[in-house]
Amino acid sequence: MSAIIRLEHPTGRPVVVVLGMHRSGTSMCAHILSMLGLDMADDPQRRPDALKGLWEREEIVNAHDRILQLLGRDYASPLHAHALAPGWWAEPAVRAVRNELIGWLRHRIGDSPRFGFKDPRTCRALPMWREIFTDLGLEPRYVFCVRDPRQVGRSLGDRDRFAHDDREYRWMVYNAHAVAAVGTAPVCIVPYEAWFTDPGVLLARLAAHTDASMRPDEPELKAAVAGVIDAGLRHDGSIGAMRLNSITQDFYEQLTASAEAGRFTEAAIGLAQHFVGFERLMAPAHSELAQMRLGLAEAAKQLAAMHAVPAMA
């Protein structure tokens, strides 16, 4: 078993921030953090595709969705993974949502000593969240969930019917932005597959990183965690010969290689920064494509309206 490293953090009131692409085990991780004694959600929000709960805070998810809609990047849109405008977090409409979040957090956190939250969209919103943490005097304890991009793609394809290339690109966007923003700061990296092979090590790492109130070696806790880790969610044999772009594969390997050290490797950070830089170079092309798609959507809407008008007698 690997040694557990207790990471040193800067002083400040801690807030646990669970990061990771959709379908990467963030819900399971937040659930387990709640078992360790952290205040992770007010309502588990169970639904058919997450029977054990989403473990998200509705106020934060709604704020993220409003911001993405303001920026023309809502989740269901084919433009979702396109680059956000430079300095998007300083836009007046976005700052209004940010200020609402600050007001809600100030009230909700109260005296809670172990507050945390999880929402995959946070990966793209970290520039705004850094301002929020500063304004509220909070010190983020990052927990980063990562899963094989082929498995994430399979799951997104089954649930959301996204095209293969879109799934892989979304995986890169979410993970690259999270890694570039976290940089060399301490982070507890949680490879999804390790929950099924070495859950004790992950549990101990999470407890140490978050200063959890529960001891990770308590038999009752280990039994409860075992009940959350559903082997039926692993799906190792379902990706067949699915191939990845070499950049995606290299990035995934660097992320999993970072887990034991509790910090992203220089190579992982470098790949993330290069990807984000390339995304900025592509922004004009993305903007032009977005306008074309909006024009086509408007034309289709007008055509449908014309067909819906009854013929004149």
Image (cartoon, grey):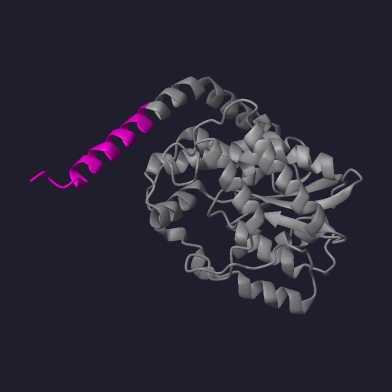
Q: Quadrant of the N terminus?
A: bottom right
193 left or right of 223 in image: left
Residue nearer the viewer, 211 or 134: 134
Residue nearer the viewer, 177 or 98: 98
**Residue at image location 21% in from the left, 47% down from the top:** 308
Q: Main secondary structure of the magenta part?
A: helix
In the image, residue 172 sits, relative to residue 290, either above or below, namely: below
**Residue at image location 89% in from the left, 43% down from the top:** 10
Q: Quadrant of residue 134?
A: top right
275 left or right of 10 in image: left
**Image location of residue 12, percent across then percent down:** 90, 47
For the magenta stretch, what is the residue range?
A: 292-313
In the image, residue 282 sits, relative to residue 33, either above or below, namely: above
Count up the numbered dots. Answer: 0
Residue situated furthest right in the rendering: 11
**Image location of residue 184, percent across then percent down:** 76, 36
Let me know if residue 313 appears in the view.
yes
**Image location of residue 305, percent across then percent down:** 25, 42
Let me know if residue 260 appears in the view.
no
Residue situated furthest front in the rendering: 313
Residue nearer the viewer, 162 or 136: 136
Q: Is 269 within the magenta?
A: no
